[in-house]
Amino acid sequence: MIISAISDLDVLGLDMEPFWDILKKARKPDLLLFAGDMYDFQNPEAYELILDFIKMIKWDCPIVAVFGNHEFDEEIDDIMEASKNKINFLIDESIELKIKGKSVGIVGSRGSIDVPTWWQFHHVSGIGNTYKERTEKIKEMLAVLKTDIKILLTHYSPTYKTLKGESQSIYPYLGSNKLEKVLIKTRPDFAVHGHAHNGIPLAFVDGVPVFNVCFTANKKLVEIDPENLPKTGLKKFA
């Protein structure tokens, strides 16, 4: 099984040609994950172009996505219309799919950050509590998943470890260390996130692989084989 993932195409602005070039070079996946911010500011119609690209290369795999911080709540209806029900968007919810005889469970959310941004603090009422509640809900959803493969998909990072390369002073605005405890307790097979444009592509939380699939960190679709996941430490030699 090949699971491919990418996020943060917003850095491309209105020129999506680099994404098309990436798709043409990639292997056809069995599942495609979008970790948010797939278009530049207030351009939800970009999802139509993304789906056109996927149709042109004849990929018919399921697509599961979460929203990023640049995909505003008031644009969700426009995004849904542009995606024509061909993308499964998860808003603090889970989905179970059957792929190649395996059950695949995905918990999807924007995720949490440890410190709300200045804009969020001044414009989103109760944002601090929202992040606390979201962290708890993610933990509950992962805990009840009983699928063969269990994935956490978020926009914000569920660890500071993939943020290496960013300024440490902004780590709390890019992700949440609190979600590390969730990963350790619920043991998903792996986690996928975006948002960390200058972060590193891969880190481990108590052996759980965490993939930063941000476009700028990889310049490609990140391919993940659930049956051959990267290992850390002595496990690499097992």
Image (spheres, helix red, strand yellow):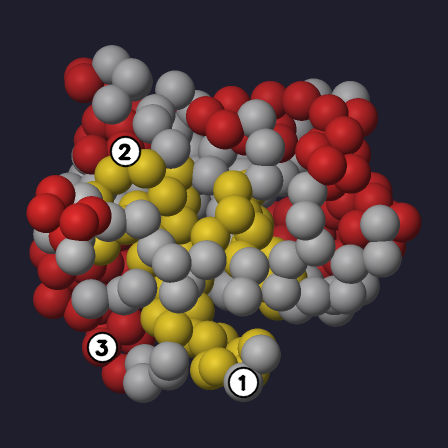
Spatial distance from mark 1 to mark 3, Cα to Cα? Answer: 22 Å
Spatial distance from mark 2 to mark 3, Cα to Cα? Answer: 23 Å
Residue that label 2 marks: 162
2 or 3: mark nearer the eye:
2
Camera-nearest residue between 110 and 125: 110
- The residue depicted at 39 percent of the width and 20 percent of the height is 198
Q: Is residue 237 left or right of residue 131?
A: left
Label 3 sits on what residue type? Ala
Residue 203 location (% of width, % of height): 25, 39
> Circle 1 — which element?
loop
Is tag 2's residue or tag 3's residue first in the polypeptide sequence?
3
Residue 86 location (% of width, % of height): 74, 65
Asked if residue 23 can be seen in this view, the reply is yes
Spatial distance from mark 1 to mark 2, Cα to Cα? Answer: 32 Å
Residue 20 location (% of width, % of height): 78, 34
The C terminus - image quarter: bottom left
1 or 2: mark nearer the eye:
1
Residue 230 location (% of width, % of height): 31, 49
Residue that label 3 marks: 143
> Circle 2 — which element?
helix
Is residue 166 depicted above or below 194 in this figure? above
Is tag 1's residue or tag 3's residue first in the polypeptide sequence?
1
Label 2 sits on what residue type? Thr
